[in-house]
Image (cartoon, rainbow, N blue to C red):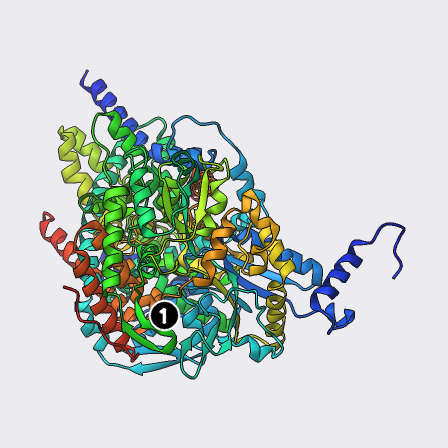
Amino acid sequence: MKAAPVAEGSLVAAGVSATPRRRAPRLDELLPRWATFAPALLLMLGLGVLPLVNLLYTSFHTVSWSGGHATFTPVGFAHYASLPFDTLLRAGLGNTVIFAVFAVAGQMVLGFALALMCSRVTRGRMFYRALFILPILVPGIVIGAIWKLMLNFDFGLINQLVELLGFEGRNWLGDKETALASVIVVDIWHWTPFCFLLLLAGLESLPQDPYEAAKIDGASWWQELRYITLPLMAPAILVTFAFRLVIAFKVFDEVYLLTAGGPGTATEVVSFTLYQRFFTEDRAGYGAAMAITIMFICALLLVMALSVRRRSEPA
Amino acid sequence: MKRLSHRLGLYAALAAMGFVVLVPIVWVVTAGFRTQISLLTGELLFTPVLANFTEVLFSKTSDFLVNYRNSLIVGLASTLLCLTAATLAAWSLHRLRWPGWVLHVFLGWALVFHMMPPVALASAWYVMAREVGLDNSFAGLILAHAVLNLPMALWLMGVFVREVPIELEEAARIDGASTLVLLRRIILPMIAPGLAATAILTFVFSWNEFAVALTLTMKQTATVPVAIAKFAQDYEIRYTQMAAAAALSILPALVLLLIGQRFIVRGLTQGAIK
Amino acid sequence: MTHQRGRISRRQTVAGLTAGLLGAGPTMAAAQTKVAPITIVINQSPWFDSFRKTVELYEKETGNKVELDVNPFAGSLEKQRNSVRARQGQYDLLIMNSGWFAEMYFGGFVEALSDIDPGLKLDPDIFTLGNTVYFDAAKKTVGSGKLMSMPISPLIPVVYYRGDLYKEAGLAAPQTFADLEANARKFNKPPRQYGIVQRGARGPASVSFDFYPYLYGFGGSVFKDQAAGDYSVALNSEQGRTALDYYIRLSREAGHPKTASIDQAEVIQNMVTGKAAHVMMVISAWSQMDDPTKSAVVDKVEFAPTPHAPGLVSAPGLGHWLGGVAKNVPDERKRAAVAFLRWYQTKPAQMATAMAGGIPVSAAIYREPLASERRFRWMKAMAESLPHAVSTLSFPEAGEVIPILELGLNRAVAGETTAVAALNDMAGQIHAVMAKYGYKTGTLPGLK
């Protein structure tokens, strides 16, 4: 079959446009399939599996160093069992969940609103895109340091503005009531560009036909949003949300510089507790168990959030 | 009338948001031109000085220009690697009829991997890198960053790849297009905006990444975040130098963003078969 | 050796100096023997610049090559750990912080200096900083045994106070805690000026470090006798109660209203902007006080040792840096590292450090005339304090004890718990940690 490509094409077309049927892949289908998948697979296998396996293995041992050598003592599930008694971890989990939920919700809404607004702007869209992306270009440490200065009780810009408006300046990062909220605000400022960028790209890839049809039918702005935009954007929104949530669970740089977990444990987040236990206290086994547990909880949260979404989606 | 007030409302909202976004950025950039005491007392009017920038760029203890170059190399290379692998894999998984379980396992695994705290990954990677002698090299860090950003790139490109109507692909195949031509002429142009967005994000994440960069580099290969972190010292934070370094750090990311975006979209849509 | 009329070449001067420095033993040729190049891992800090200049002087004088790998403080420990735990280390000379030198000793990651170079003797003028340079591997105690490291930077807290305000009021430098309290109250005029600004925030080593001079100055301590291996918890003693009560009272009645959230950066901020009349802070911030781009109180700040209770001595806690030689590097590099340390402790090297803006570890420099110069006025306080500096936690698991102290003290300062409850609670937790790792430990009967 000299005209193999053509025949393959029509076979494929026939196969797909009719009822899709499973059949053994042919050799000239296997090559492109594996060639395109291989790079990502190799990367993940080579660099992704080993560390995770190592972490799992370590979580069932206690590691101690002497004479320049490490000793791995198996302890079974002991580390996992002692996790619920870790007061810092309990505080951290609570704070992180609150932080993740509010920060991510805020950013998704804000990011989507910004993306919608930008997509309706005809002139200067490039300008607005560059403008609203700026915060994410700043390294996390700098964000922490700069906002810390701005929120400073004695000299900060925020208190200066607040006092200008006639109110009393507050110790935003130092008062238990406002500390976590302040960290959330900083995070929203920092990460909304992420949502904005992705949702705008999503909006720009949407097909125009449904909108034209809707315009002919005389649909309102709200109806357009609810019945066309949101359903079509669903995959982009979901992925943005999922990744934003996972990243929120890993937040570290900003908290480290803003509050270092204080006052008390008001802004203790899990990545912080993990850093403390894993590195500062050098408890590799316990830290590994904590890392695995945190990943599990994050996954659980994600699954819960996604199932809620699926249930609320109109059929 | 209604349309005008809508327009005005839109621009007003955009302006307000722009203001909120800009104020801290302007604060950071101008802080680079202040003396430390001026910043600490929070005075609004000040006389600008260049001392911070000269210290960051040219002092004996600072290799900022070297760090810049390193970050550019690592950022561009890892973004290229990551995005190539991710786009090809995403298209492959969604469109080349892999068995369903492969798709779900791989994507699920990628997400789980993404949940792993980078600090924990960093030490594991250090040990691996040291064994093969890559611990103070660009290659090690480039690979690490590519893998770090792979899950997100994979999922995002999956979204954009699936937006390409499958009829288009089939039509191309009927016309005798090989896989390569299919990718280059049909798929890439259609996913160009999404690809651009993902590329920007991947580059920015690599540019700003700290934990792994610190572990896998030494003096000659250190990146910009490592350099900036040196200003947050154990006994003081050198705010003004940090601000100057941050201002310099935002620059290439911004330039790449403005130029790169247009480039990527235009470059990919060239030669598109409609 | 010929020399031109009236002019001695620089190389000959240096050569002469070097020969003079190394004494009669080694010949000139041996004195200029090249050793292997070494890599030093150190963190970026206010005193780093002076260290760098000192290293450059060493390179110039001896022709040996030294590579400085400078890291941010956040991550220094990880980098050093990674290097010492690998089969082949990246770094030859480790500049270790007081927070982790014990981990390096106990883990066998650094080699005793006397094992590498049996002829090496610590210069009698060098401050041994709570004897933290010695370690007994058999008994596993810090404070005696072999010489494991060389002091690099002797950082301890001192009192920074507003000399101009004192002069106006005709007061002498504060010596006892009673002095400090009286003067702080006198100058407390909130919100424009606070009598004292303390570092009460919770952090990696924040409020606990701030509290040590108070605790030990009142005669209290965290453990009964670390040097003898007795880790019985002594935190919740009567002296501990007095110290914490004093600390909290000071913060409430003469200090910053938000002490519980004030960290190191903000303490410095308050001092340089002129808002604080006193602070107790690590010495390395001295250079900021007289720098017009960083301070609004140029030439107004004076220094004094941390206060003490009557009859006792000033007892600042150590936050110092020691130089140790890694075990997992080739022998020739170990010898080269020791050669550097041997040079570093000499008087000319220490003088160079001081002139470059660093803090010398040799008592000889503090006796020099330059210590009376205006810009080195902090030297007097240092010379008085250094002999009494206390190493508070000299064991590898200190990383687990510090967070207990940080959280407990922070909550007491914030008023979330009473001082007594905080002390008892911390003591109990610390005891649990020490027992977990098999140290000889015990508790005091709880405070009522």
Subunit under mark 1: A
Check the picture and name the quadrant holding the N terminus of chain C: bottom right
Question: Residue A302, how many percent across, how many down?
Answer: 19, 57
**Residue type (three-letter) at the residue carrying disc 1:** Pro
Question: Residue C28, how many percent across, how many down?
Answer: 77, 69
Query: In this view of the protein, which residue sits in the foreground, C440 or B36?
Result: C440
Give the structural element (helix, strand or loop) at label 1: helix
Q: Quadrant of residue A1?
A: bottom left
What is the tally of numbered marks visible in this picture?
A: 1
The residue identified by callout 1 is A51
Placement of C390 over or under C332, stated as above or below: above
Residue at 19 percent across and 65 percent down: it is C424
- Residue A31 in view, yes or no: no
- Residue C308 in view, yes or no: yes
Residue at 47 percent across and 39 percent down: it is B244
Question: Residue A234, how many percent across, how many down?
Answer: 20, 47
Q: Would residue C151 appear left or right of C265 to someone viewing this image?
A: right
Residue at 41 percent across and 33 percent down: it is C168
Check the picture and name the quadrant holding the C terminus of chain C: bottom left
Placement of C118 over or under A264, stated as above or below: below
Q: Would residue A84 appear left or right of C44 to someone viewing this image?
A: left
> Which residue in the rendered view is the most extreme toward the top?
B1
